[in-house]
Image (cartoon, rainbow, N blue to C red):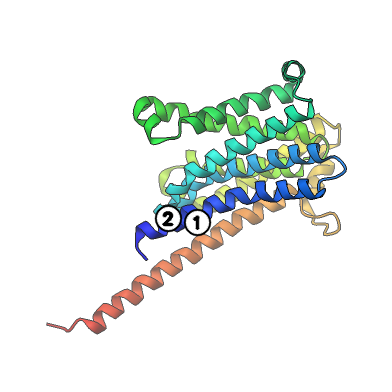
Amino acid sequence: MTARQKIFWLRLATLIGLCLPAVELAWRWYTGGLEPRPVTAATHATGDWAVIFLMLSLAMTPARALFDWMPLIHIRRRIGVAAACYAGAHFLIYVLDQKWNLIVVATEIAKRFYLTIGFVALLALVALAVTSTDGWQKRLRRNWKRLHWLIYPAAFIAIIHFFIQSKVKIGEPAFTAGLFTWLMLWRVMPAKLRTRYTGLAVLAISATLAAVLFETAWYGLVNGIDPARVLMANLTIDFDIGLRPAHKVLIASLLVMLLVAIRRLSLAANKLWTRRYMQSTIPAP
């Protein structure tokens, strides 16, 4: 299979994967699987997928460097556009929930802080999606890269929106915040450390501690829960309750290290096999 064919199939598989959540959600809505509050369930689901795809788009640059696989650059744009589309669907379903009364929608956005920042994040994502084409890249030139730095504050604002909307159950937002910390620290880390196991270990520890800090601060400041209780919960694993966000961040970080090791071993084995094959088939002079 040629490199062009690999990229084609990768893009196709990515497109199908990006559409599957929307198709599954539409089917569940049509068959009554979202009852008793389908609009609310759909609003939350599209918002969750917007955040997931936003994190995935940010993960493409580290993944390309860590796994030494250039084709990943060809799907980063598609994932980012998908994040904007799901965020747009998230907003439109909310408008539907308000009976398409745009005055009420505008009033609610102005009055409620979490809606205000969510709308700001949506505007940023839409602007990035619209200008993501090669044509806009040529028109904007150097300003294109400056504009697309908005992805970082947009992701941060989206996570804050995620926290506030989740209210008491902030396990998923705290996990997402831990992953976001990993992705941002990787970008500011010295280039030599980014692909080394030492650097990945530092990222794993830092992101895990960040998830603990986010969860502790939220429960302490917003819900008035003793921070010591949250810290103790993160030091133990209760399988009846489930893993804490920090545990999930640590597992995800260790999984990245494992996958990187497997990838590098496979590349080394392939190079060794190729060299031996060439030595066995090319006659000595």
Is residue 212 visible from the viewing direction of this image? Answer: no
Residue 159 in picture, x, y percent from top left: 67, 35
Residue position marked by numbered label 1 in the rendering: 197
Residue position marked by numbered label 2 in the rendering: 8
In-image side of 275 versus 56 (left or right): left
Q: What residue type is labelled 1?
A: Tyr
In-image side of 82 versus 135 (left or right): right
> Label 1: few (<14), some or many (≥20) within 10 Å?
some
On the rendered image, what quadrant is the C terminus found in?
Answer: bottom left
Q: What residue type is labelled 2?
A: Phe
Figure quadrant of residue 140: top left
Q: Which residue is found at the position 76% from the left and 44% from the top?
A: 171
On the rendered image, what quadrant is the N terminus found in?
Answer: bottom left
Residue 192 in picture, x, y percent from top left: 41, 48
Identify whether 261 is placed above or below 172: below
Identify whether 43 is placed above or below 30: above
Please tell me whether mark 2 sits on a helix, a strand or a loop: helix
Residue 219 in picture, x, y percent from top left: 81, 36
Q: How far apart are marks 1 and 2 (CA)?
A: 32 Å
